[in-house]
Amino acid sequence: MLGRGAILMNQGQLSTTPGVSGAPEAPGAPGALDDARARGAADRVAGLAGVVLCGGRSSRMGRPKAWLPFGGEALLQRVVRRLREAAWPIAVVAAPGQELPPLPEGVLVVRDPEEGRGPLQGIAAGLEAVAPLAERAYVSATDAPFLHPAFVRRLADLQAGGHAVVVPWADGHHHPLCAVYACSARLDAAALLAEGTLRLSSLFERARALVAGPELLLADLRLRDTDPALRSLRNLNTPEDYAAALRELDAEATLRELDAAADPAPGGSTGRP
């Protein structure tokens, strides 16, 4: 079962949230990362929070994924930045004692109550943390460098149809760490954990889930225009995956530079992807 009485930092204020285990966390470092209120708030989905799981062991990668450099920032920072364009607040679920790169002020940091119980426990803890503040949450892994806000918004639109969970299906399997969950699904997750069941597929069987294939996802014109290959579903498990993603990022930067050189008008640069 999840622990009780954790204290979380929410935009510099303490709030007590039963059901989430972990010690108090200091608010993230202010500065360039701390623009959550000023930038993109109008594009966020009402009632939608974000949960980022980063407590995995990164055994195949060989080093902590949260700290991997990616486009001038750590990978966890990038995922949080992209996710908060569509969702707020954001909760980062980390392992006990895990060190994290600096995060924007107001990001909630939650600690897994117990190591080795997999993503189902992380989802339960993250949903518990944001439940007082939102009705649902997009759940992401740390290693999703190409997450696009339009993808988050599309899943949120589908979940608004009355499903407890909307989970993508592509490449022959579910993508439970690229999905939207009603915060009420934390109760089903906690019940499964209490039974000793750790399989995420059991949550989809227990909760009312919509499985969304590529055709359904790309029926949305905004997503089809911005992420037609559904790169939002990509994750980085190995050094080879990481190297390939860096090559793609470099290629995109080169294309932007060429576009800016061809069209030097003010505002031609798109900034960080």
Image (cartoon, helix red, strand yellow):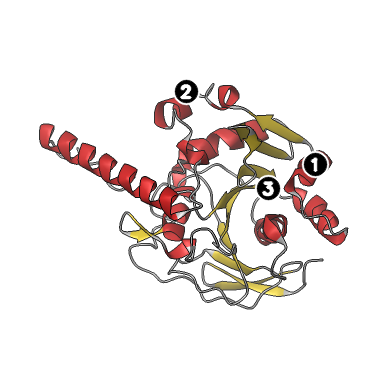
Question: Which residue lies under the disc numbered 2?
Answer: 221
Q: Amino acid at mark 2?
A: Leu
Q: Amino acid at mark 1?
A: Ala
Question: Which residue lies under the disc numbered 3?
Answer: 135
Residue depicted at 27% across the width and 46% down the height: 250
58 is higher (above) or lower (below) than 113: above
Residue toward you, 32 or 252? 252
Q: Residues within 10 Å of mark 1 (few under 14, many from 20)?
A: some
Which is in the foreground here, disc 2 or disc 3? 2
Question: Which residue lies under the disc numbered 1?
Answer: 207
Tag 1 near tag 3, CB within 8 Å: no
Quadrant in which the C terminus appears: top left
- Taking the image as shown, residue 26 lies to the left or right of residue 22, namely left
Which is in the foreground here, disc 2 or disc 1? 1
Instruction: Identify the image quadrant of residue 33.
Output: bottom left
Q: Residues within 10 Å of mark 3 (few under 14, many from 20)?
A: some
Q: Amino acid at mark 3?
A: Glu
What distance separates the C-alpha of mark 2 from that of mark 1? Answer: 29 Å
Residue toward you, 246 or 166? 246
- Taking the image as shown, residue 57 lies to the left or right of residue 66, namely right
Q: Would you say residue 270 is visible in this rendering?
A: no
What distance separates the C-alpha of mark 2 from that of mark 3? Answer: 25 Å
Mark earlier in primary sequence (2, 1) = 1
Label 1's element? Answer: loop
Instruction: Identify the image quadrant of residue 239.
Output: bottom left
